[in-house]
Amino acid sequence: MSKKRIALYPGTFDPPTLGHIDIVERAVKLVDHLVIGVAANPGKSPLFSIDDRTEMMRHETESFAGAGRATIEVRAFDSLLIEFAQKVGATMIVRGLRAVSDFEYEFQMVGMNQRLNNDIETVFLMADPRHQAIASRLVKEIAMLGGDVSAFTSPYVVDLLLKRRKELKK
């Protein structure tokens, strides 16, 4: 019997976008089990708590598992990525790429991660052309300024963004 292929798709997911969901939909075709790691990353000043972001990713991805695709688990983490990958038994880290600027950063990260653990490979999935311009940072900014972000994320996340905007305006 072959070894179970476990991959980790890490990110801040603040908020989850259609680009993130596209990567999940494609990653579940490649592995047996996909762990979506929601990073604490306080340096990015998240709009949503780690618990909120974890719950959003659970909600957004619950329908993708099964029917010959990977099982999915969503977990928060606040450690080094490579340490979390080892903890969950991942042999692969899945990353989405939108543009050349993403590649430059990711290329550095791969080099560092390989030095920390050469047994964990990084696999890049190119963003669907429809989602290449979508960045969580921009979605947050547009939503907080009252713009329509329905083309960039799900109705569920749009609703949460609107609620957060109202909370912050009080």
Image (cartoon, grey):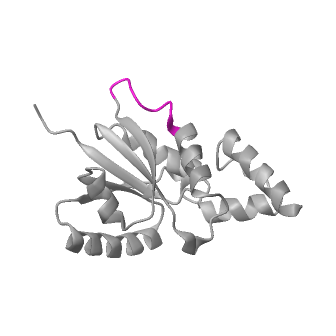
Using the image as rendered, state which of residue 99 and residue 64 is in the foreground.
Answer: 64
Where residue 11 appears, as percent x and y from the top left, is 47, 59
Where residue 32 appears, as percent x and y from the top left, is 28, 36
- The outermost residue toward the left is 1
When asked about the image quadrant of residue 96, the answer is bottom left
In the image, residue 9 lies in the stretch drawn in magenta:
no
Q: Is residue 89 left or right of residue 153?
A: left
Write the residue at 30% across / 50% down.
88
Write the residue at 40% across / 41% down.
26
Q: Magenta segment, principal secondary structure?
A: loop
In the image, residue 66 lies in the stretch drawn in magenta:
yes
Q: Is residue 22 left or right of residue 120?
A: right
Using the image as rendered, state which of residue 78 and residue 128 is in the foreground.
Answer: 78
Using the image as rendered, state which of residue 55 and residue 115 is in the foreground.
Answer: 55
Where residue 78 appears, as percent x and y from the top left, is 45, 64
Where residue 130 appears, as percent x and y from the top left, is 56, 49
Using the image as rendered, state which of residue 119 and residue 28 is in the foreground.
Answer: 119
On screen, residue 6 above or below 110: above
- The outermost residue toward the top is 67
Write the residue at 51% across / 52% down.
129
On screen, residue 139 above or below 1: below
When asked about the image quadrant of residue 48, the answer is bottom right
Q: Is residue 130 visible?
A: no
Q: Is residue 87 left or right of residue 12?
A: left
How many numbered circles does the render carry? 0
Write the residue at 59% across / 45% down.
56
**Which quadrant: the C terminus?**
bottom right
Q: Is residue 165 left or right of residue 158?
A: right
**Which quadrant: the N terminus?**
top left
Q: Is residue 132 visible?
A: yes
Q: Which span of residues is magenta-colored?
A: 61-68
